[in-house]
Image: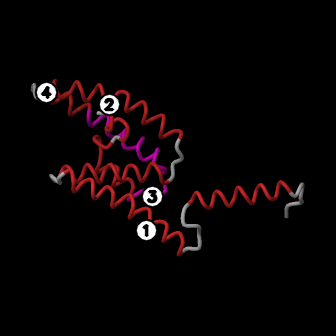
Amino acid sequence: GLMVGLTSVGSGSLIIIALMALYPALKANQLVGTDLVQAVPLVVSAAVAHLWFGEVDWSVTIPVIIGSIPGTYLGAQLSSRVGGGGLVRRALAIVLMVSGLKMLGASNAFTLAALATALVGGTLAWALIRHRLGFDFFIWQARRHEAAARAAREATGPHKED
């Protein structure tokens, strides 16, 4: 329930993947918000139908709701404070990958190995792509260089900008 609330992965895994593909310029928090807006009416109507026919297992429903409420709050707070860039998008991709593997029946060991491979391999692949394009390996290095250049400019005193 907490992971569902944090990531909205349970409400629209396929929809969020489609949104990521169709609208690559959307920020991650906009993707999650858009996914939730379409998911809420869908989930409410499905819940009403299942309640109507008595197909609700309350021993599962109650813990999921209890976990989802703080997860939803935390997820909304995090997504509004974290930039819409790569961190949230990568976290969504990782959660979707892990949930997809588990839905396909992958063992915990295989899922953990895939997760480690994605984290390490994805980070290294991204660093190599950045390097080939002439950027620093990691964004934090670029930010450190920019901060040092800014400090050096400020230390030399006022200057006229072109």
| Mark nearer the N terminus (1 vs 3) | 3
Q: Amino acid at mark 2?
A: Ser
Residue at position x 30%, y 45% from top? 12
> Mark 2 sits on what residue?
68
- For the residues labelled 1 and 3, the Cα–Cα distance comes to 20 Å
Mark 3 is surrounded, within 10 Å at the Cα level, by few (under 14), some (14 to 19) or many (20 or more) other residues, namely: few
Question: Which residue type does callout 4 highlight?
Answer: Asp
Residue span colored magenta: 21-43
Quadrant location of the N terminus in the rendered image: top left
- Name the residue tied to disc 3: 24
* Nearer to the camera, 109 or 150: 109
Between disc 1 and disc 2, the foreground one is: 1
Q: Which residue is mark 1?
A: 125
Precedes in sequence: disc 1 or disc 4: 4
Marks 3 and 2: which is nearer the front?
2
Instruction: Give the Cα distance between marks 3 and 2.
Output: 27 Å
Which residue is drawn at the image coordinates 25% and 48% (left, top)?
99
The label nearer to you, 3 versus 4, is 4
Question: Separation of disc 1 and disc 4 at Cα?
Answer: 44 Å
List x then y, in percent, for residue 93: 36, 53
* Rendered image quadrant of residue 114: bottom left
Q: Is residue 132 left or right of residue 10?
A: right
Q: Residue at x 49, y 56 (%)?
A: 25
Residue closest to the eye, 7 or 52? 7
Residue located beneath label 4 in the image? 57
Measuring from the top left, give residue 74's x and y in whole percent: 43, 33
* Amino acid type of the residue that numbered disc 1 sits on in the rendered structure: Ala
Residue type of the residue flagged with mark 3: Pro
Question: What is the crowding at mark 4: few (fewer than 14 residues within 10 Å), some, or many (at least 20)?
Answer: few
